[in-house]
Image (cartoon, rainbow, N blue to C red):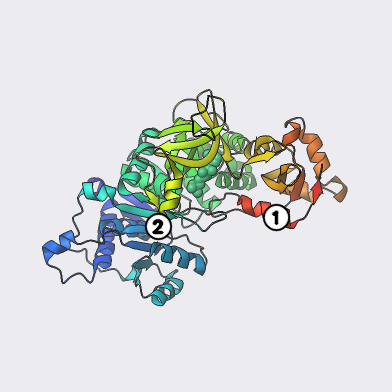
Amino acid sequence: MARAQRHGGRTALVDSQGSFTYNDLLDASSRVAAALLAGREDLQRDDLKREDLKEDRVAFLLTPGFPWVAALWGIWRAGGVAVPLPLNSTRSELEYFIDDTEASTLVFDALAAPSMSLIAAARGIRALSYDQLPARPPAELPDITPDIKDQRRAMILYTSGTTNRPKGVVTNHANITAQIMSLVEAWEWSADDRIVLCLPLHHVHGIINVVSCALWSGATCQMLERFDASAVWDRIAGGSVTLLMAVPTIYVKLIAAWERASPERRADLSRACARLRLMVSGSAALPVSTLQRWQEISGHTLLERYGMTEIGMALSNPLRGERVPGSVGRPLPSVEVRLVGENGEPVAPGTLGEIEVRGASVFAEYWGKPEATRAAFRDGWFRTGDTAVVENGVYRILGRTNIDILKTGGHKVSALEIEESLRQHPAIAECAVVGVPDPEWGERVAAAIVLKEVLNDVLNDGDALDLVSLRAWAKELLAAHKLPSRLLVLDALPRNAMGKVIKPEVVALFQSAGNGERVA
Ligand code: AMP
């Protein structure tokens, strides 16, 4: 809060309703805090200063914008644990997050009111509509000293569970501060920065890398309610942003929008990109073809980084210096990273291993799951479940150990490497490689592909890309055991709200398709 006071009259946020200063944020968040603490007025003034929410969970469902940030800060100022809920969740998903965290209060806007008030009423928990905040800031708010606050839980984010129900990842205030400070240092954030938020706000990428780094630095965050390619291009063209951070699928959509534009507009957009100082990609592997196309369009080499809900960001290509396509660079400041083999011992350079991470930015626990928390650590190192290899000092991600590292005919192969090769095929727009259980091979390499639209239209039935022709084409790029032996052509890959392919769903598609096209 002291940092925000220093930035006082500067613009903190811009949303569809207008522009808001750091003072506006301090005022609105104090009113959120007061509303959360209401009902404690019977306490003496000194007790009130000491009495806070003491880590009560407050779940909130708000559209990205000024109220979202005011709610987050208000919950923290009242001593609560913030549980940002994903927009577009089903009722039963919302109920799961609210019940799992045992939230004591729900905060929401008019859009979310119908479902959230019903959920609150059914559980007898407090419902607080953002539109009904007290008009005036409170005289006093709890005085939570930094040493106590640091170790207090601050936020619970749900991981995109694949087979099991999602786990709540708990970070305390010290974890969050460490995550922010590491990025502010590495990417040289300053008060002059202006960033456009085009990511959802239930995930570390939008919450920490974009909104929190901006506000920590005294910068300005322009918040879109949801991703919209033309709105992002308008911000870039308007010259009002210095930074862009997004997931690979967003860059793919920005490329498609640029390609649909008129030649004059394209030239304007490309010229405007020169005014940005940094463009970052992460949260999923960035295809080299996307990096190259974006380079042609914008003149920027995307800075790819690697991170996870549990650790914040861990690896990054450099702000200054060579960014290696297909790699995620080196450890960020104050983050320790190592690769270990199946025995838990560090591996020799050039050998693939599991990424383990240690440092103040690593999360505190899985909410209510001490066993899962214990299992996630080895000698104080967090086991990410991602496999990587270090080449010339930089890390290359090979994928989730249990999903993307396929075991086929006694070989270990990386689905991400095969995908990178298949994307070079002129007819393939997108692809996802998975291992499908097979009694003979252990797992078969199975490729789900989406054809490029133009080619899809002109291909006659006889020309359709089939498994035999794909294998014949790919054998120049891939060793025989890496060639797909199952193929599915889809209209779209199943993806989550962050644009990541949901691989278990791809496996299920192969399983329900039966044997399909197969080569022994
Ligand atoms: P989440 O916790 O939703 O952010 O997902 C984290 C996971 O995304 C990691 O464990 C990786 O599997 C994946 N991931 C994040 N960044 C990258 C990247 N640059 N390249 C490949 N995978 C990534």
Q: Tell me, yes or no, whether the two marked residues, 1 and 2, touch with CB atoms within 8 Å.
A: no
**Residue that numbered label 1 is attached to:** 509
Q: Position of residue 19 (x, y in %)?
A: 35, 55
Tell me the crowding category of disc 2: few under 14, some 14 to 19, or many 20 or more residues within 10 angstroms, Cα based.
some
Q: Position of residue 459 (x, y in %)?
A: 82, 47
Drawn side of residue 520 relative to residue 123, left or right: right
- The residue that appears at 19% across and 62% down in the rendered structure is 51
In the picture, measured across the screen, residue 97 lies left or right of residue 470, that is left
Residue at disc 1, secondary structure:
helix
Three-letter residue code for mark 1: Leu
Residue 292 vs residue 96, the one in the foreground: 96
* Viewer-closest of 370 and 403: 370
User: Residue at point 79% right, 40% down?
Assistant: 470
Which label is found at residue 368? 2
Residue 349 horizontal side relative to residue 417, left or right: left
Amino acid on which the number 2 mark rests in the picture: Gly
